[in-house]
Image (cartoon, rainbow, N blue to C red):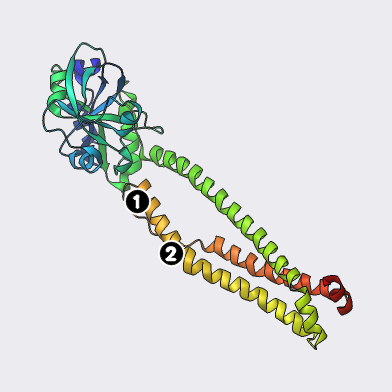
Amino acid sequence: EEMLVKGNPLNEELKQEVLSIDGVTDIIVARQSLHTSIKTDANQNTGICDMLTDQNYAMVEAALTEGAMPTDSHSIVIHDQIVAHFEDMGVGSTVEFSSMDGKQSIPVTISGVVSFSKMPVILGHGRSHTDGCVFFAPKDLFCELHPEITTFDYSWSIVSDPKKAETVKAELKNIVAEHSNLALDEIDTTIAAEKSQNSVAFGSMQVLSWLVFLFGVINLINTTLSNQMSRKQENSVLRSIGLTQKQLCKMNICEGLCYAFFATLAILIVGLPISVVVSREISIATLHGKVVPYQFPVLEMGLFILVLFGMELILSVWTIRRQKKQSLIEQMRAME
């Protein structure tokens, strides 16, 4: 705020300097912000407050979970996590909205609560987005709190020709190096941070899926062996009335492969629709309403089906060889 009073570095002079870079086509004011505090008799919360503008008004309104948008200059919108921590900071509550130095304080009403998980953009910079806003307030409230500040620009988005991206980036870095109170937030940094976070989530889900796969194979082995053991007497009776060893082998193998086939069919008929629906809902919840098309896990399912049929074949052959080692009389005696 002291720097903004002396003169915002994001000024017209800097704007013209950036626009003069070969490849830069436009500059968009991304955020207008102040570091502020809201306080009740019992609790206090500090953080960056963003100004409600024509550019972000619709986005904030769409992210409302409670209440409504401000209708006057003494109403604000706050983050839903603040409400979760402080019971006396909800819709309709009156709080003291003040500057960080505490010199100016204005009573305001909390008119609405927003969830940033519903917003299509990340309101923060750097890898951790630590400067993300926690309040939204009208421009008139900004001016009333700090009438000495003429412009509240906090960050700009630089629009450039993709073919000249590297040249633009290099020139912007030179400009930033000449100003100690400016920083450059590159899209590559945001992408790297998102990939890092997603890799943890995806890795956890993959571990879970492999555990399910492992237990599925164990269950398959257990079910098949239990079935074979329970049918020993039946097979012995069939052999005693003329069933040949070749026919018995054929019957065991066919039964095992049929079990694997119907298990695969059940996966596709039941599991596939469930996967599509779950994938859609998770996509909507985590990507601000955007639906990412479902991709069938060809490699994983191919491996699962291969193991399914392979295990059934191996278990059938193992059972047949075991039966060959015992005579018909020994098998029937063992079941008595």
Image coordinates of residue 268 in percent, x first then y, are: 49, 68
- Look at the image and tell me whether residue 132 can be seen: no
According to the image, label 1 marks what residue?
Answer: 284
Q: Give neighbour class at mark 1: few <14, some 14-19, many 20+ (Cα, 10 Å).
A: some
Dividing the picture into quarters, in which one does residue 36 lie? top left
Farthest bottom residue in view? 242
Is residue 130 positioned above or below 222 on the image?
above
Is residue 68 positioned above or below 331 on the image?
above
Q: Give neighbour class at mark 2: few <14, some 14-19, many 20+ (Cα, 10 Å).
A: few
State which mark lies toward you, 2 or 1: 2
Q: Nearer the viewer, residue 305 or 128?
A: 305
What amino acid type should be assigned to the residue bearing mark 1? Ile
- Locate the C terminus and report the quarter of the image it occupies: bottom right
Q: Residue at x 21, y 18 (%)?
A: 96
Numbered disc total: 2
Relative side of 275 to 261, left or right: left
Dividing the picture into quarters, in which one does residue 48 lie? top left
Q: How far apart in space, not on screen, are marks 2 and 1 (Cα)? A: 17 Å
- Locate the N terminus and report the quarter of the image it occupies: top left
What amino acid type should be assigned to the residue bearing mark 2? Pro
Q: Nearer the viewer, residue 110 or 243?
A: 243
Give the mark, 2 or 1, whose residue is nearer the N terminus: 2
Image coordinates of residue 208 in percent, x first then y, are: 56, 50
Disc 1 on helix, strand or loop? helix
Disc 2 on helix, strand or loop? helix
Image coordinates of residue 330 in percent, x first then y, are: 88, 74
Number of the label disc, if any, that sits on residue 228: none
Image coordinates of residue 90 in percent, x first then y, are: 25, 29
Q: Nearer the viewer, residue 99 or 161?
A: 99
Farthest top residue in view? 103
According to the image, label 2 marks what residue?
Answer: 273
